[in-house]
Amino acid sequence: MVTLCLGLAAEAQGFSGTISVGVDSEYLVRPGFVVHNHPISWTNVRLEHDGWYVGAWGSIGLDGQIEDFGEEVDITLGKKFSLAGFRFDLSGSYFVLSEFGEWANDLYVFDARVEAPDKVPFVTPWAAVRYFGSVGEKSPAAGWFGWVGVQRAQPLGFQLPFQEGEAVLNLDAWAAFSAGGAFRGDAGPVYTRLRASTVIVIDEATTFSPYIAWQAPIQDAGRYVDGDHHVVYGFSVTRSF
């Protein structure tokens, strides 16, 4: 009923959107450090119109072993566009890491990403930067991160049961860098990560996507990484409207 109502409202206003739910085996955040090594579940709702999008992402811990950790709500407003053969994605977010109405741990975030499709053979290069801004007295220290990577959609040469077309493995590899300061870490390269996923079509509006990722630390970078290699896996189910 919720999906139907959202879908009718979006269609009436010329919007499109998705609702996704997923499970991750560890709470491995984008800067590269593991908040904790217990599983989380998450939900993401996103609306798009003419390149603009707004989203709300929320997570909770699953096993109850660590109180509060893994509980997060992110609100994002962004714009996607193409220019001179490049694809751009600019956004701003507010990360609610405390209870609503309390600001001690929260962050605001600015993201910029550019992709270069069809510029080099075989892969699509991309680069991204993120600024973390502190809000409260217990918020992580502010600073910049950057990422450079390549991605590829690799046809596998066979067809999965009940699927149309050839199966595709989506591959993504990147390295992370810090300008120093953020999360009280050191400047320099932080980690590398490899990720593989695929998309299985359930029906015309629903997909299932399992993934596995491997992260390797490059240097001891304060709170960014704990010096260990991590294998993280999970899945998501997405419904479009």
Image (spheres, rainbow, N blue to C red):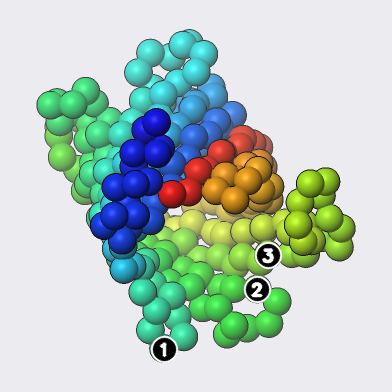
Q: Secondary structure at mark 3?
A: strand
**Above or below: residue 222 compared with residue 60:** below
Q: Which residue is tagged 3?
A: 153
Going by the numbered disc 3, the residue's amino acid type is Ala
Of circles 2 and 3, which is in front?
Answer: 3
Q: Position of residue 190 (x, y in %)?
A: 49, 52
Q: Position of residue 44 (x, y in %)?
A: 40, 40
Spatial CA distance of label 2 from label 3 is 8 Å
Spatial CA distance of label 1 from label 3 is 23 Å
- From this viewpoint, is residue 237 visible? yes
- The extreme right residue here reads 158
Q: Which residue is tagged 1?
A: 84
Q: Position of residue 129 (x, y in %)?
A: 37, 62
Of the pair 84 and 68, the residue shown nearer to us: 84
Mark 1 crowdedness (10 Å alpha carbons): few <14, some 14-19, many ≥20: few
**Above or below: residue 42 compared with residue 200:** above
- The label on residue 123 is 2
Going by the numbered disc 1, the residue's amino acid type is Ala
Q: Secondary structure at mark 1?
A: loop
- The extreme top residue here reads 65
Total numbered circles: 3
Q: Earlier in the sequence, mark 2 or mark 3?
A: 2
Of the pair 5 and 174, the residue shown nearer to us: 5
Residue sitting at x 39%, y 51%:
17
Residue sitting at x 45%, y 21%:
61
- From this viewpoint, is residue 145 visible? no
Of circles 2 and 1, which is in front?
Answer: 1
Q: Position of residue 240 (x, y in %)?
A: 48, 49
Spatial CA distance of label 2 from label 1 is 18 Å
Going by the numbered disc 2, the residue's amino acid type is Val
Left or right placement of residue 52 versus residue 45 in this view? left
